[in-house]
Amino acid sequence: MKHVNVTINGRQYRMACEEGQEARLAGLARDLDARIADLRGKFGEIGDQRLEVMSALTIADELLDAQGRIRGLQEEMAALREVRVSATERARATQVAVTAALNAAAERIEKTTRALNSSVGGGTALG
């Protein structure tokens, strides 16, 4: 376990984190500190605890919005998957129909060729 010293709202904190997460933790602390400073600039000195709670609520609100957007995107992806599956099935059905039509046309051409060969050439193959 690693430890990082961060400053939030003018106070030093020694925080534990997993190996390799030190920079992320320091960045999160800087973001929280900046949010508190921003609120202090808007509302003045209304008390450290109140500023910290307001910052936490702002972050929670952003998190809820992000979760809602994620859910919306997941639903959109599921709908797009369904459309893709449906399109793939239609493409396969079209391919089968085209193949059947081409085979039927080839059989008719062969039948016509045989009929022409037997009636025109007296049984001698043309072409």
Image (cartoon, helix red, strand yellow):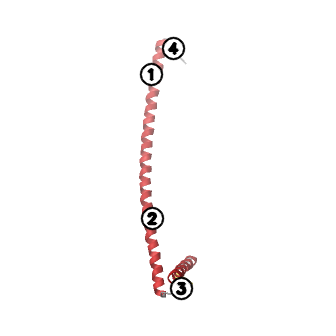
Sequence-earlier tag: 1 or 2? 2
Give the CA separation, mark 2 to mark 3.
Answer: 31 Å
In the picture, the disc for residue 9 is 3
78 vs 10, left or right, is left
Viewer-proximal residue among 104 and 54: 54
What residue sits right under mark 4 in the picture? Answer: 124
Sequence-earlier tag: 1 or 4? 1
Give the CA separation, mark 1 to mark 3.
Answer: 91 Å
**Could you say where residue 63 lies in the image, as x and y percent from the top left?**
45, 72
Q: In terms of secondary structure, where does tag 2 sit?
A: helix
Residue occupying image coordinates x 47% and y 24%: 109
Give the CA separation, mark 4 to mark 2.
Answer: 73 Å
- Amino acid marked by disc 1: Lys
- Amino acid marked by disc 3: Asn
- Amino acid marked by disc 2: Ile
Give the class, few, some or many, for how many residues have Cα within 10 Å of label 1's Cα (few <14, many ≥20): few
User: Relative to 46, does residue 115 appear above or below in the rendering?
Assistant: above
Query: Among all residues in the image, which is located at the extreme front?
Result: 43
Give the CA separation, mark 1 to mark 4.
Answer: 15 Å
Q: Nearer the viewer, mark 4 or mark 2?
A: 2
Q: Nearer the viewer, mark 3 or mark 4?
A: 3
Sequence-earlier tag: 3 or 4? 3
Give the class, few, some or many, for how many residues have Cα within 10 Å of label 4's Cα (few <14, many ≥20): few
Q: In terms of secondary structure, where does tag 1 sit?
A: helix
In the picture, the disc for residue 111 is 1
Give the class, few, some or many, for how many residues have Cα within 10 Å of label 3's Cα (few <14, many ≥20): some
What residue sits right under mark 2 in the picture? Answer: 70
Q: In terms of secondary structure, where does tag 3 sit?
A: loop
Q: In terms of secondary structure, where does tag 4 sit?
A: loop
Q: Nearer the viewer, mark 2 or mark 3?
A: 3
In the picture, the disc for residue 101 is none
